[in-house]
Amino acid sequence: MLQLTNVGKTFNAKTPNAKVALRNINLTLEDGDFVTIIGGNGAGKSTLFNAIAGAFLCDTGRIYLDGQDYTFLPEYKRARCIGRLFQDPMRSTAPSMTIEENLALCYQRGTRRGFGIGVKKSDVAYFRDRLAELGLGLEDRLKTKMGLLSGGQRQAVTLLMATIVTPRLLLLDEHTAALDPATAVKVLEMTDRIVKKDHITTMMITHNIQSALELGNRTIMMDEGEIILDLKGEERENMTVEKLIDMFSQKRGKKLDNDRMLLV
Ligand SMILES: Nc1ncnc2c1ncn2[C@@H]1O[C@H](COP(=O)(O)OP(=O)(O)OP(=O)(O)O)[C@@H](O)[C@H]1O
């Protein structure tokens, strides 16, 4: 379970450039919740992920994951339990290392077998099986360097790397936004399959409102550092993109503004 209480963050505090990026965020996720997150430009979505992952310490509030207080834990320690994917698939991988070496690094980190890029023979069969599940034929390319893969293939392997040891929390920051539409659909299907199979508590930022309403079991909308809508159950099932945009305008007295947002 993830719990955020009164989390706040202001960048450049006490300067003319002060920017309140998170305002008093209160949020509880149950185990296995899959929450999609939408919001306009600068709403605070990535900052929320940075706060949870420990890219900086928050000014106020506390963060708990599975009962452990993460508030002051350094980022590298949180990374042992929090998987994170970014828009750029290369960000979390070593391009000059092979698929199996990249997977081995993540697998070893989880099982505390020490570091180094040695790949255990006994693990190779497991990697092959997990890669086969992706349905991209990558199980026969274990020795291919990550840098030679297409964007979609890389993101699929990155997803596997982040989940090869089941994380307590998975943060997906527009992880399909840089892919062509057909590949994005494939990677989203993979994501859904893995998250459901391993019952992973997941948060996914997306600029596609339709897929935000279709994937997962809950949708949060942010604006100006606040959570302004939290949809689940029947209300979410009956929600449409048009209704959501209307709700935003009514609540905030302005139009939803995101140059990358897909409104249809
Ligand atoms: N390191 C930083 N220093 C100063 N301001 C920052 C920093 N990181 C984020 N901000 C500001 O905080 C606000 C929230 O940014 P954030 O990146 O979280 O928005 P977002 O919802 O992810 O937006 P987008 O969809 O445009 O990526 C923005 O005004 C942004 O300029």
Image (cartoon, rainbow, N blue to C red):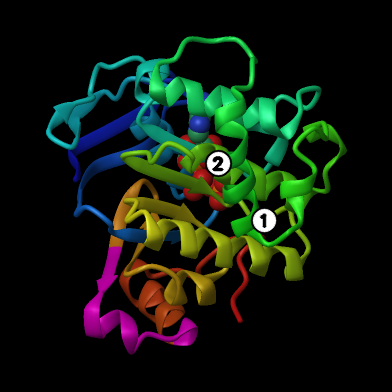
Q: Give amino acid for label 1.
A: Ala
The local secondary structure at tag 2 comes to helix
In the displayed image of the protein, which residue is found farthest to the front?
Answer: 122
From the image, tell me which residue sits under label 2: 126
Q: Give amino acid for label 2.
A: Tyr
Q: Earlier in the sequence, mark 2 or mark 1?
A: 2
Which residue is rendered at x = 39% and y = 72% of the image?
248
Q: Residue 136 or 218: which is nearer the viewer? A: 136
Which residue is rendered at x = 78% and y = 27% of the image?
95
Residue 177 - label: 1
Q: Residue 12 or 81: which is nearer the viewer? A: 81
Span highlighted in magenta in the image: 229-242
Q: Are marks 2 and 1 in contact (CB under 8 Å)?
A: no
In the displayed image of the protein, which residue is found farthest to the left?
Answer: 67
Which residue is rendered at x = 38% and y = 70% of the image?
253
Q: Is residue 158 left or right of residue 198?
A: right
The local secondary structure at tag 1 comes to loop
**Number of residues whose C-alpha sits closer than 10 Å to that of mark 1, classed few (under 14), some (14–19) or many (20 or more):** some
Residue 42, visible in the rendered structure: no
237 inside magenta stretch: yes
Residue 153 - label: none
- Measured Cα–Cα span from mark 2 to mark 1: 29 Å
Q: Position of residue 199 (x, y in %)?
A: 32, 56
Q: Is residue 109 left or right of residue 183?
A: left
Q: Position of residue 8 (x, y in %)?
A: 27, 33
